[in-house]
Amino acid sequence: MAHFAEIGTDNIVTNVIVVNNEDVLDENNVEQESIGIAFIHNLYNDDTTVWVQTSYNSNFRKNYAGVGHTYDETRDAFIAPQPYPSWTLNEDTCQWECPEPYPNDGIYNWNEDTLSWVEIPKPYPSWILNETTYYWEAPTPYPDDGEIYIWNEETLSWDEE
């Protein structure tokens, strides 16, 4: 699937859509951005809106476009909004970088006032860090039966409320 970003005022992305691969192929079955844009203009009966192809895998234009991101024509890149004033743009990746490296021993939030990472404590001593989602999780999954449960640290189990 091919992805295209609608570019609005001040080069801000206002929409991202998906187009079937066959709708962006030329006569040699090579993907062409211009063919995809022509398809979208025809689809919406509007040839004035600016569309730019984006890569879901960030294979080109540095980053996948998201609503609210900026398309920088000079860098030919999509750039997310700056998360904090102290963060700087990496010119190679066009991603925002924090002035301090993220610690690797827990879950943290950035504190712009102190320019430091602040640890989010574990809700319970037995809970563990899910290194895929970066959330604290109980050692046993929450029951999925529609009832309401509360964690019991003494028995290391979910008790019905």
Image: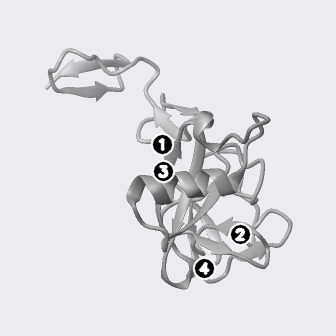
How is the model colour-coded?
one colour
Task: Name the residue tied to disc 2.
Answer: 98
Task: Name the residue tied to disc 3.
Answer: 17
Please state which of the two labelled residues, at mark 4 or mark 2, is closer to the viewer: 2
The CA span between labels 4 and 3 is 39 Å
The CA span between labels 1 and 4 is 22 Å
Q: Position of residue 65 (x, y in %)?
A: 59, 59
Q: For the residue marked with disc 3, what is the amino acid?
A: Ile
Q: Position of residue 32 (x, y in %)?
A: 72, 49
Q: Are marks 1 and 2 in contact (CB under 8 Å)?
A: no
Q: Earlier in the sequence, mark 4 or mark 2?
A: 2
Q: Are marks 4 and 2 in contact (CB under 8 Å)?
A: no
Tag of residue 93: none
Question: Can residue 108 be seen here?
Answer: no
Task: Name the residue tied to disc 4.
Answer: 114
The CA span between labels 4 and 2 is 13 Å
Q: Earlier in the sequence, mark 1 or mark 4?
A: 4
Please state which of the two labelled residues, at mark 1 or mark 2, is closer to the viewer: 2
The CA span between labels 1 and 2 is 24 Å
Q: Residue at x 70, y 43 (%)?
A: 57
Task: Name the residue tied to disc 1.
Answer: 122
Please state which of the two labelled residues, at mark 3 or mark 1, is closer to the viewer: 3
**Who is closer to the viewer here, 41 or 60?**
41
Question: Can residue 13 be seen here?
Answer: yes
**Who is closer to the viewer here, 143 or 6?**
6
Q: Residues within 10 Å of mark 2 (few under 14, many from 20)?
A: some
Q: Residue at x 48, y 63 (%)?
A: 67
Which image quarter holds the N terminus? top right
Secondary structure beneath disc 2? loop
Q: For the residue marked with disc 2, what is the amino acid?
A: Cys
Q: Residue at x 34, y 16 (%)?
A: 155
